[in-house]
Image (cartoon, rainbow, N blue to C red):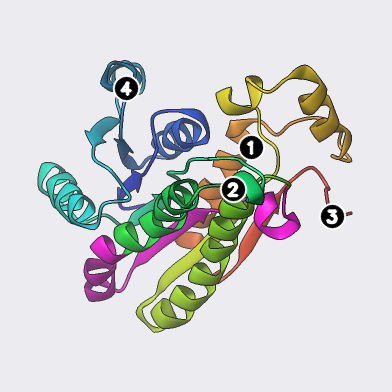
């Protein structure tokens, strides 16, 4: 395989970090975007040898400039984009502020547009590309207190289907991965009773591991996955069985 450049947003922690590690192990050059905690990002880079870059994926201009910097540093174009950056601002609708709504939509959905826009031109010129966006089980199921998050992640699925249709003739695949409840630091901070209730809904009776989500991303990123596009791969322990 020609060594390709992969860029992962939110790539230094949680699922994003696992994706970077898996892509690196599969032979890709990897650039990991992050927005805060520079010390943690540098430690991740030292541990994994992934290159780290700081910008706000919800800011269109920062994404354009960030991608240019990555491409210049690696002297090639981004061929694998993983839209992983995401946040939550959970509240019941009657307590949710417009600021809570806008923040989640801007990061969880808006960043997919910003980043894809920054790489799609070069992908079309080369007639090769992989865009993989991380959605969520809650895009499909819905979740109490997450109208903003569920709407954003459902938007990712619609975005994926439409961009896949636009890009198919240029041999660019666009897919989404919808993880179920995953063992990340965000989940680990939940009260025990809430966590137990979440796990009880999963037929396999456990949380996903970040590495299990990462394996799906590596599969979709592969050259050999060129006939899979517009799809959402659910990794949820049988939640819909």
- Secondary element type, mark 2: helix
Query: Callout 3 environment at 10 Å: few (<14), some (14 to 19), or many (20+)?
Result: few
Quote the CA–CA distance across marks 2 and 3. Answer: 18 Å
Q: Which residues are magenta?
A: 117-143
- Mark 1: few, some, or many residues within 10 Å (few <14, many ≥20)? some
Q: Nearer the viewer, mark 1 or mark 3?
A: 3
Q: Nearer the viewer, residue 68 or 195?
A: 195
Q: Residue at x 18, y 45 (%)?
A: 70
Snapshot quadrant of residue 40: top left
Q: Secondary structure at mark 3?
A: loop
Disc 4, SS = loop
In the picture of the structure, the residue carrying the numbered disc 4 is: 37
Disc on the earlier residue, 1 or 3 = 1
**Which of the pair 94/224 is nearer the observer?**
94
**Toward the viewer: 40 or 229?**
40
Residue 202 occupies quadrant: top right
Image depth: mark 2 or mark 3 in front: 3
Q: Label 2: which residue? A: 216
Q: Are marks 1 and 4 in contact (CB under 8 Å)?
A: no
Per the image, the residue denoted by label 1 is 212
């Amino acid at each position: 395989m020609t060594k390709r450049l992969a860029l992962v947003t939110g790539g230094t922690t949680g699922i994003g970090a696992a994706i970077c590690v898996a892509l690196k192990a599969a032979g890709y050059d990897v650039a990991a975007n992050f927005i805060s905690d520079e010390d943690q990002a540098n430690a991740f880079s030292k541990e994994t040898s992934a290159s780290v870059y700081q910008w706000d994926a919800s800011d269109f201009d920062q994404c354009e400039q960030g991608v240019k910097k990555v491409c210049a540093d690696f002297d090639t174009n981004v061929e694998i984009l993983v839209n992983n950056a995401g946040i939550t601002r959970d509240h019941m609708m009657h307590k949710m502020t417009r600021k809570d709504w806008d923040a989640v939509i801007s990061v969880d959905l808006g960043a997919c547009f910003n980043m894809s826009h920054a790489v799609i031109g070069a992908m079309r010129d080369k007639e090769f590309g992989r865009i993989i966006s991380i959605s969520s089980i809650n895009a499909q199921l819905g979740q109490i207190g997450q109208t903003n998050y569920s709407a954003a992640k459902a938007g990712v699925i619609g975005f994926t289907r439409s961009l896949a249709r636009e890009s198919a003739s240029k041999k660019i695949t666009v897919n989404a991965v919808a993880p179920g409840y995953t063992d990340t630091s965000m989940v680990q901070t939940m009260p025990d009773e809430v966590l137990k209730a979440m796990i009880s809904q999963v037929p396999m009776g456990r949380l996903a591991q970040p590495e299990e989500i990462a394996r799906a991303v590596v599969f979709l990123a592969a050259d050999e996955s060129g006939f899979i596009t517009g799809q959402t791969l659910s990794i949820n322990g049988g939640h819909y069985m």
